[in-house]
Amino acid sequence: MMQSDVIEADLNHITITDPFLGEYQRLIRDVVIPYQWEALNDNIPDAEPSHALANYRIAAGLEPGEFYGMVFQDSDVTKWLEAVAWSLSQKPDAWLEQTADEVIELLAQAQCEDGYLNTWYTVKEPGLRWTNVAECHEMYCAGHLFEAAVAFFNATGKRRLLEIACRFADHIDTMFGPNEGQLRGYPGHPEIELALMRLYEVTLEPRYQALARFFLEARGQQPYYYDIEFEKRGGSWHWDNWGDAWMVKDKAYTHAHKPLAEQSEAVGHAVRSVYLMTGLAHVARMTQDEEKRQTCLRIWNNLVQRRMYITGGIGSQGIGEAFTSDYDLPNDTAYAESCASIGLMMFARRMLEMEGDAHYADVMERAFYNTVLGGMALDGKHFFYVNPLETHPKSIPHNHIYDHIKPVRQRWFGCACCPPNIARTLVTIGHYIFTPRPDALFINFYAGTQAQFTVSGGDLKLTISGNYPWDERVDITFTHPQPVEHTLALRLPAWCDNPQILINGEAAVGKRRKGYLHLHRQWQQGDCITLLLPMTIRRVYANPLVRHGAGKVAIQRGPLVYCLEEADNGTQLHNLSLPEKSVFREIEGTGVLKGKVLLQTEGKRVATPSDDQPLYHFDRQQTVIEKQTLTFIPWFSWANRGEGEMRIWIQEA
Amino acid sequence: MMQSDVIEADLNHITITDPFLGEYQRLIRDVVIPYQWEALNDNIPDAEPSHALANYRIAAGLEPGEFYGMVFQDSDVTKWLEAVAWSLSQKPDAWLEQTADEVIELLAQAQCEDGYLNTWYTVKEPGLRWTNVAECHEMYCAGHLFEAAVAFFNATGKRRLLEIACRFADHIDTMFGPNEGQLRGYPGHPEIELALMRLYEVTLEPRYQALARFFLEARGQQPYYYDIEFEKRGGSWHWDNWGDAWMVKDKAYTHAHKPLAEQSEAVGHAVRSVYLMTGLAHVARMTQDEEKRQTCLRIWNNLVQRRMYITGGIGSQGIGEAFTSDYDLPNDTAYAESCASIGLMMFARRMLEMEGDAHYADVMERAFYNTVLGGMALDGKHFFYVNPLETHPKSIPHNHIYDHIKPVRQRWFGCACCPPNIARTLVTIGHYIFTPRPDALFINFYAGTQAQFTVSGGDLKLTISGNYPWDERVDITFTHPQPVEHTLALRLPAWCDNPQILINGEAAVGKRRKGYLHLHRQWQQGDCITLLLPMTIRRVYANPLVRHGAGKVAIQRGPLVYCLEEADNGTQLHNLSLPEKSVFREIEGTGVLKGKVLLQTEGKRVATPSDDQPLYHFDRQQTVIEKQTLTFIPWFSWANRGEGEMRIWIQEA
């Protein structure tokens, strides 16, 4: 266990040298974090006000005023702080660190004597703390505070925010628990469970792990806590939630309809589901709790075997931002929230840490290189909440089934969860590339990095280079001066049929286990592992139980899912089809797509009819088929060239 | 014009001898009308209360109590009266007539001194009459009263209800109009326009036609009347309409965003749209108003060329029960309300009266034999509001895009518009079969009937026999004793490639004009026209601009659209495909489908995968194709054998 814990700290100081992800990290530093700072300070013209910092100032007594914003507005500040912390780990920035320190001081001033910290309740409803954990996000905000505190401590060594977090965690630990006089509640929006485990990793305070366990085990027990507190407060519900206390009543919406040990399906609000499972998997591993592990496996399998889009998107419907049912994966009305795929990455990472199985890395990579990257525009200034797999912009404004769909990325959102979440994921990507486990250092995907790990045999220092995921060749070179004996586990991606791995030019000999090649060796300075992972262009087929994939095919190259866009292929993408035998060629993108591999092949198009062709006709001969070159782009880069149709699944004929 | 007017009256006394439609008429008489009577009297256990007759009794001062129900609850009673009237035309029933007379007396007692009659306002908000015509359905209810009055007068010769209607119409005529002191309003839910024209046909009171014209011409003029009355009443909106007065603001929802003369698209609430157009087409014909005719043609063409399902269903979305945009015709989330297709039949009939073009009859027949018949179960006791073209019942309860979809017909509805509307359409079907025009007596489709028409040359008496639309042969025999010279126009259906028409065994010679064969002759007793309309099984293709039809085919035989149902074909209908060359055979239905022609052919099925097959795979070889016999049933008869999947458009491969 200690080996793993030590290495965990090393993950905070990985340098991304990858030209592709490096550019994203630069955008986070130079564009996203400064932009979000301006947003938090309400300095963006035409954007919805945030008021998030003002709320803290009011709570701290520094200025008069009223609370404004969502019940989880505080978390916008702490998510920003977390992104700043990770960014400082990557690249010091004195102004940014000082600005963050000032924000942290503000949080300290806004914190109550007893450790409580939530500006909604402090400013607006001071008497109502902890009366509505089902709907009111106090624990969700606490969780993001804890995550920021851990990140800031790791990045800077400064303990100020960590102390604030621990005081709040201690307060919550006195309020909630199984003992006489404590509340038996658990949060409507999970997050605190995973955050308490992060806090535990840094502080080694066993109460935090125990509290996470309590929240997980109390969940869904009868009588339902949501009902108990609902009655206690006289049957009122939170003003943000229209309707008749539905969030209290629909307990499956928050995985609280029965104890987790009795659950087998990914249900309800997709983000809540995967955040919850992330915490559960973490606790399962740390406490070696087989029952919790089995719950994780059941819900994971249901999720990725039946409720996940090819893009790693999850949540098939807009209303409720929620899962629907097995194999119900409509492409044009998908929700597939960016944050849900981030949560899926987190869940996958925890499962990978527990299981050491490349299957989890396959899903993690799928979510990252498709939905998460796709959530942000190539300019770093525009974001998708919702990531459909097919759009027909002309129809979107007129049919309410598309109410949640935007045909292009938007600048900022009233509910600002996705942009800072994407930011913090991109700057912590090293945590997903490497998984230190007791049995080996796992390398999950091969983005260019420089990293150093303290392992039992000494210091392992390595550089990954190449141009992943565009080029097939990846080199891992070792630069530590002293030889180190250790096991490296290299993922053999599921999308790659014929991977070759060489050590110093000779075929590597190792054990292939759960999708990883385990290489045990005394690694010397100058050793070089070369991976050849042919980026074959693959046709992907959906399970026949997915009715929205019937008769259709998708294209994938490496981990990247491709799509057709109107900019390259004209309108009416539904009339394009891909012959079974068409051969693809690779071309380089231009303009905003420069550096990206595009794909071309010969396809077919049902010709556009004349204006007076009737809606329905009996004559197949009227259908004129034309040849057309099809150009596919990586789906994550869609909608960077204005509004237009887009489609991943196309007819194969 | 007089020829047409005289014949119109004859339409009320057509006897349906058709075994197929005859059974539907029997169901209306024996099941639907009695059931609706019990519902109106709140005698149906487990059904939502109607309270509609109670509202009239309270308004009449006969009993104490409060109004209960929708703002258009009154129309449930008048629609029932209308169905009763038409039923009495078909088959006298002393008890039913007496019951109707008593209801009519109740209406008389509920009518105010000044002619006003609406129980919502009389009982609940007496001071607020005519303050919210945008939302509050006073004119809609008036229209249904007028239609019932005309029907009852035609059926029985009794004037009592007609007098009530005229008193109310006169009151409205004083309140609304272009003169000083009159309101310039027009109804949010059109209906009164078409009803005033019916009232005019019977009374020949020119004020009624002029008032219909006023409503049509005032519509959409600026400043908008909806805004004027909205401000006048202090910005309040009707409690039934959640949200922020959206029905006032979204003027396109009611075709009131601009004057009708400037409109070109079928927009907003589908029922409102076609009801409005029905009135407009009637006025256009009667006043020979070319501008109005051109508006009808533009909106008609947009509707049937771009916004109509193959089933004659209209309205592509549930929210708003509304049109969406051109070629946006999703099958599984369609609204396609039964009442909207009834309205489409009404609009088509008025266009046909004006234009004498079989195109309108084609659409009328499509809507009738598919969506309207499909709206009622074969037992006469269950009804669809919403008529999707594809259902996957397992997914319906879990995805909110299906909130409006029911997988099987329901007994009755809180908003009870469709069942009585279907009832009155079925009992007046003679009005759709025959169209008397100055140039000819048009026969539009060939359901078995006995009818008598007074034409300029004398009395034309004819019998249509056969088994339409199942069998190809139809005989029209003449039974009047005196020879009559007249033109008959026989529709040559668009779905029929090679119609043959014989007179007394010899090929008929006539002029083919706009899809009708015009036969001018002195018709003798014993003359017989034989039509051979081959009921070929046709493959139907959607216009390539309809993305939900891409790669798919539908099956039609005669006017009937067919579908696959789970009861015959198993689950996962999306995995079935129809080879291009498959040959069909006809079989007779059994059980509840007895008497119906079913179709069978050899098709293919993508085999159901094993439970552990992943969601996505790279190997086309994993797709196992099996042979399967496909059984198609007429779509109108779906969901009569319990809950199951259904699909009209299937893969052609």
Image: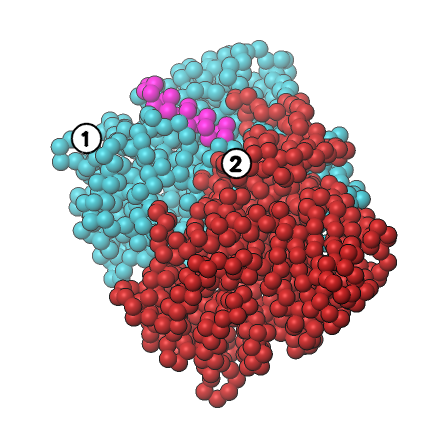
Chain colours: A cyan, B red
Drawn side of residue B523 relative to residue B81, left or right = right
The residue shown at (57%, 55%) is B426
Q: Residues within 10 Å of mark 1 (few under 14, many from 20)?
A: some
In the image, is B195 to the left or to the right of A12? right
- Span highlighted in magenta in the image: A288-309
Nearer the observer, A376 or A331: A331
For residue B49, above or below residue A260 = below
Judging depth in this view, the residue of B2 and B277 nearest the camera is B2
Amino acid type of the residue tagged 2 in the rendering: Arg
The dot on residue B641 is 2
Instruction: Name the side, left or right, on which B639 lies relative to B482.
Output: left
- Residue A166 appears in view: no
* Labels 2, 1: front one: 2
> How far across and down, in percent of the image, does residue B423 sit?
52, 55
A327 is higher (above) or lower (below) than B244: above
- Of residue A299 and residue A87, the one placed in the foreground of this image is A299
Instruction: Return the mark for residue A178.
Output: 1
- Which quadrant is home to the N terminus of chain B? bottom right
> Looking at numbered disc 1 in the image, what kind of residue is underneath it?
Pro
The C terminus of chain B sits in image quarter: top right
Magenta segment's dominant SS is helix
Q: Position of residue A106 (x, y in %)?
A: 28, 50
- Rendered image: mark on residue B634: none
- Residue for point 86% across, 53% down: B507
Give SS at disc 1.
loop
Q: Is residue A64 left or right of residue A374?
A: left
Q: Is residue A409 magenta?
A: no
